[in-house]
Image (cartoon, rainbow, N blue to C red):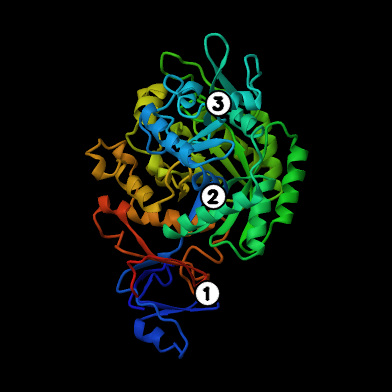
Amino acid sequence: MNANIVTMDPLTPGAEALAVVDGRVAALGTSAEIRALACADTQVVDAGGRLVLPGFQDTHIHLQDSGYHYGMTAALDDARTPQDLQAIHREFAASNDGSWVNGVGWNTGIFTEHNLDRHVLDAVVPDRPCFILAGDGHNACINTRACEAVGLVKGTADPHNGHFVVDAAGVPTGLLYEDAVKWVEDRMPEVTDADYADGVRYGQALCNRNGITGVLDALVEERHARVYKGMATRGELTVRVCATAKVFPRETTSAALARVNELRSNNALEMFRIHSAKFFLDGVMENRTAVMLEDYSDEIGGNAPLMFGYEQVKELFVAFDAARYQIHVHVIGDGAVRAALDGLEAAKEKNGLWPSHHQLAHIQCIDPADIPRFRKLGAVANVQALWARNEPSVTDVALPMVGEERGKWMYAFRSLIDAGADWTLSSDWGVSTLNPFQIMETALTRQPPRRNGDHPVFLAEQRLTREECIKGYTVNAARAAWRDASTGSLSVGKHADLIVLDRNILTCDVYDIGDTEVLLTLLGGRQVHRSEAFAS
């Protein structure tokens, strides 16, 4: 009642009140009209005239893994120097007596092989193995005890699509790139399903506090599915979870399809289902594993190979598209974007176009010739707008690597939308915050928060609008997650997934959007978050 409801349904764009019956929107209208439908035991919520929106959906997030890491290991996001990192990790080690001392979230735009190695960690954790995962998930560092524990020694061969950084004498420094991270994780003590379930609880509570009622977990394997399915069966999930099953370069097409088919058929629940296949075509700029059409522009130069063979990409995309999977692709460099679009084009030519909403995630660099292909192929630009601003990973790392001309097409979100591409906004948590309001503010300003100083705008011509940002988290996100029939708008008959905000993000100062607080989050009409500041 007494709300400013923006439904995101063009047939009924606004209302003062709505009624919920059995978890779904039953009616929309004025406060008087809806109050007349109430009976003696009806619960009434007075929104105090505040903005009400459909629950947000994050279509590229690592909910289970990041929930585990941030819920149970040291958070290193605030470290800006090696001394900062050591201080945070020293404090965590002192209060945790586990056999390993782990952390997550260090910034790859700040920490590189020049200032981070096993000796930095040895200084604060000399007596136990230590593993710290970078915020991007593509890099990690371990200490000397950890090297000994997992058998990483001089001469250890790099795993496929991975690299152990070594010093001048060939001794591992402890830095790990790409699948070298997985090589180490496979040799660490096993984490229990109960611990990962606790991670989901931590992550979904954070989602609910930030107005998120649905997610697309962008990388699941058998363990992820097992944990999610168990929680869904027990009624423990407070976000709707769709998921993408990872496909590996080492697999044959038939073997990958058979394995993922089994995952899909065994995980098709109301609150959890697998419907997508996930492909990593390249890595990240920071460790030089992003794939470019032309060599890097800095003094080092060089390039990186695709993580799948070019023809293998086409074969896999054709097969998974024919089996009616959504294809979800990690692409950072313009070469990886080109390969992904070529794969989708091969699938379209072989199987025809259908409403798959295949997604290309990240799109840090793109050749302008490929921008119109998104609309032609029905591909969704799944973008993480928080990265599109002047910060070390962009200004100090990426821009020098790609050069001035290619840098003009970095995070070219406005150009993609103007060319007719479908789009969603997402976080890639735990690579960055999952707070959608901070992400939307950056999409609108292309700047860090104003409280951090007056930073230059990064490619102002690529800014988005408020309406586009909200669509990117609601109707567009629901469509991309294949649940728009029941979510994404506050339409009669759809799930009553909604949020009440402390300010109107359609009219407030754009630089205040990032400070928005979610006062109430409902999932199917059930309260999953309520702020102490909301007294209704």
Please give the name of the residue rendered at 66% of the width and 51% of the height, measured from the top-left corner: 225
Where 183 sits versus 54, above or below? above
Viewport quadrant of the N terminus:
bottom left
Nearest to N terminus: mark 1 or mark 3 = 1
Where 15 sits versus 210, above or below? below
Q: Which residue is mark 3?
A: 176
Q: Residues within 10 Å of mark 2 (few under 14, many from 20)?
A: many
Q: Which residue is mark 1?
A: 24
Q: Is residue 363 something that shows in the picture? A: no
- Residue 230 x, y percent position in the rendering: 67, 58
Kind of residue at badge 1: Arg
Rendered image: mark on residue 4: none
Nearest to N terminus: mark 3 or mark 2 = 2
Give the quarter of the image for residue 254. top right
Between the residue at mark 1 and the residue at mark 2, the CA separation in whole angstroms equals 25 Å
Where 396 sits versus 209, above or below? above
Q: Which residue is mark 2?
A: 63
Classify residue 210 as left or right of residue 444.
right
Please give the name of the residue rendered at 71% of the width and 49% of the height, measured from the top-left corner: 323
In terms of depth relative to the viewer, which is nearer, 141 or 485? 141
Please give the name of the residue rendered at 64% of the width and 34% of the height, measured from the top-left corner: 188
Q: Are marks 3 and 2 in contact (CB under 8 Å)?
A: no
Q: Residues within 10 Å of mark 1 (few under 14, many from 20)?
A: many
Identify the secondary structure beneath mark 3: strand
In terms of depth relative to the viewer, which is nearer, 272 or 333? 272
Kind of residue at badge 3: Leu
Between the residue at mark 1 and the residue at mark 3, the CA separation in whole angstroms equals 48 Å
